[in-house]
Image (cartoon, rainbow, N blue to C red):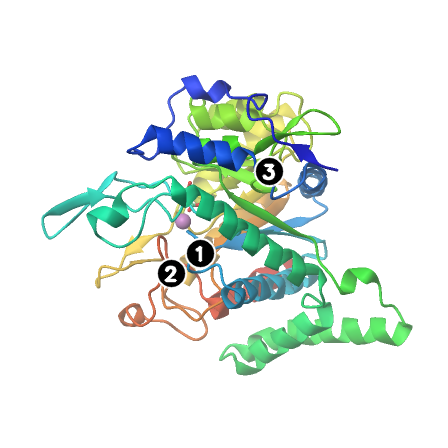
Amino acid sequence: MTATADPVAAPASWRGLPAAQQPDWPDPGHLQAVTDELAGLPPLVFAGECDVLRERLAAVARGEAFVLQGGDCAETFAGATADAVRAKLQTLLQMAVVLTYGASVPIIKIGRMAGQFAKPRSRPDEIRDGIELPAYRGDAINGFEFTAQARTPDPARLLRAYHCSAVTLNLCRAFATGGFADLHQVHAWNQDFVAQSPAGQRYERLAGEIDRALAFMRACGADPEELHAVEFYSSHEALLLDYEQALTRRDSRTGLPYDTSAHFVWVGERTRDLHGAHIEFASGIRNPVGVKVGPDTKPSDVLALINRLNPDREPGRVTLITRMGAGRVREVLPPLIKALIAEGIEIPWVCDPMHGNTFEAPSGHKTRRLHDVLDEVQGFFEVHRSLGTHPGGIHIEFTGDNVTECVGGSHEIAADDLHQRYETACDPRLNRGQALDLAFIVADSYHS
Ligand code: PEP
Ligand code: CO
């Protein structure tokens, strides 16, 4: 199927509403020219794929599947290389195999990839040595370098974001189906990880069980297609509404609007104002959508969001991504879940254990402790178990490289090590080993 470009027909009701966190583009004419060009470019994803993902998420809501969503906090143009994308996907696939075994349900694999180029910021400006410049808002908007030229928003970057998304998604699609994602290969990578990990003994039992399960299937002559390829979906925060609007197209089959920049888009904690432009935009597209909810969210807020985004109660349409912080999740999550139980609403609940656990190390680096990340996931599981609901998935920031941005892990990174390879353009990411540590520990707790 195809989706036709028809920017006029795509819902634009958000335009009159307050839109938080939008860049101050110096030249509106340039922005218009760029969005016109984007509106004529091919869609990155197809409506039918978004529909399948919505069905997968409906299965998550019923407790029959689990979401693994992850990738960089902020993708960069320089990071759209075959090596970097491969390493991220490899890590995601390795985590997914471990989690599949732990959870005994299909893992829905969603990258924070192929479009995560725009960031909300706590302050519009940044001051260094008395010089004040616009904050870095992501490669789709301005440059990371602290110069007036780099920090000036440039609409041409939106086109580059589109092309980098296309390249990244193309690599992901090829890796997902072209042999790279073969289960036996992914398992062999996990065995390497276990052999080299200081926590190896702790993970060996699980890796051994997976090994025996695979050997058993091989002995039976079972070799289903599903072992050789995976379904992979793209996602990012729908922050830059001009960009998202330009990629919103009518599905030729049904005439309904889809945001073809990604399979799944979410609205962030800072832009989810019920009466703001972001929620209005999300309500007008047919993709499955997410909303981040933080520790101050009230039960009435989540009910209002669900009523706005999913008045027809379509299964899998809205996912709530909770980011409460390890210290608060056990206290603030239950009232939200209970409010939905009371209304008979089932949704995928996904835990983002990253954004509520950020702090500044003595060295000045923004960081997170793997211990806190694990504790929030554990708390999320405990709360759902006690209420009889399904812990539907995790949403993490990680990279396939051996960066030193978060502290802890079986190859322990101390606060004093952070300067060694601190490369993130925004929030601190788990490195490859820490991401796998997380998967093994979560799988283990799922099991027990
Ligand atoms: C993010 O996901 O990088 C982010 C900004 O999260 P939140 O909206 O939860 O603060
Ligand atoms: Co982040």
| Mark 2, secondary structure of its residue | loop
Residue 369 shows which numbered tag?
Answer: 2
Q: Which amino acid type is shown beneath numbered disc 1?
A: Val
| Mark 1, secondary structure of its residue | helix
Q: Position of residue 109 (x, y in %)?
A: 63, 53
Marked residue nearer the N-terminal end (1 or 3): 3
Label 3 CA crowd tier, 10 Å (few <14, some 14–19, many 20+): many
Residue 212 shows which numbered tag?
Answer: none
Q: Which residue is mark 1?
A: 373
Label 1 CA crowd tier, 10 Å (few <14, some 14–19, many 20+): many
Residue positioned 53% across, 29% down in the render:
282
Q: Which quadrant is the N terminus positioned in?
A: top right
Q: Quadrant of residue 316?
A: top right
Q: Nearer the viewer, residue 116 or 414?
A: 116
Q: Cβ–Cβ below 8 Å for labels 2 and 1?
A: yes
Residue positioned 20% across, 47% down in the render:
148
